[in-house]
Image (cartoon, rainbow, N blue to C red):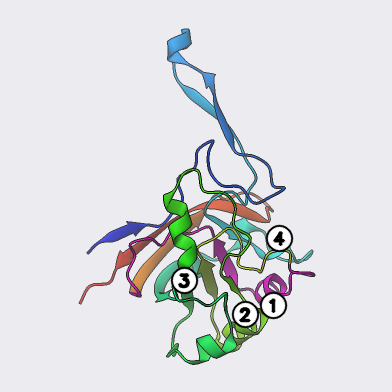
Amino acid sequence: MKTYDVTVRLSNEVLIWPGDPAFSTRPFKSMARGDRSNVTQVDMGVHTGTHIDAPFHFEPDGAGVDELSLDVLIGPCRVLDLTGPEECVDRSRLASLDLDGVTRLLFKTRNSKWWESPNEPFHSDFVYLALDGAEYLVERGVKLVGIDYLSIEKYKNPGHPTHHALLRNGVVIIEGLNLTGVPAGEYELIALPLRLKGADGAPTRVVLRELGE
């Protein structure tokens, strides 16, 4: 069974959401400088690269990332190939699909191609999840949704209604996935965020494993 690592590689060149803290690494200790070991210091925001949004990100009384259930973060998942010309994933698009029994969804869109170039600029016209699409997923009982860019919400969307619709209903959001080369279908999802106490999000290693016959 094949395993796909759909996590964006972190480096000093990683794409950052406009206005968020920059990512940087530097040697804190270096054997080349005479230290007994190598120790790297990392500076970053918790929404860097592939990451999870916890409810606390937009809900003042919401759970922190360390409180998220592993039962949601690990389990069967469907990857949807939505690489068409649509600018968003809305209710009508989702209603046209058979999502019976699906509780974890990842959207593969035209966004993924941007991760293949290390010098790609930020694109504000990324494919996003519309508010009515988010409400539809809540109605369907979806517990986790992921997308292949740095936000699931339309760029500069006043009030962040998509985030609120998902997070206030306990739906975990994964952002910054790289689904290049991942065929649509059924997988086992393993998404493990750093266990940062009370944090509104965390960098996350996300892998997909093909399901056996």
Q: Which amino acid lies under the numbered mark 4 shown in the image of this protein? A: His
Is 167 inside the magenta-drawn segment? yes
Mark closer to the observer (4, 2): 2
**Structural distance between the alpha carbons of marks 1 and 2:** 6 Å
Residue 191 image offset from top left, x and y in percent: 46, 60
| Residue located beneath label 2 in the image | 134
Q: Residue at x 53, y 77 (%)?
A: 86
Q: Position of residue 63 (x, y in %)?
A: 68, 64
Q: Quadrant of residue 22?
A: top right
| Image marks 1 and 2: residues in contact by CB distance under 8 Å | yes
- Name the kind of residue labelled 2 in the image: Ala
| Extreme residue toward the top, this view | 34
Q: In the image, is residue 29 above or below residue 144?
A: above
Disc 3 to disc 1, C-alpha distance: 17 Å
Percent position of residue 184, x then y = 35, 74
Disc 4, SS: helix
Please tell me how crowded label 4 is: few (under 14), some (14-19), or many (20+) other residues with Cα within 10 Å: many
- What's the residue type where badge 1 is placed? Ala
Which of the marked residues, 3 or 2, is nearer the chain's N terminus? 3
Q: Secondary structure at mark 2?
A: helix
**Residue at mark 4:** 57
The residue sitting at 65% across, 50% down in the picture is 197
The residue identified by callout 3 is 106
Location of residue 46 with respect to 54 vertically, above or below = above
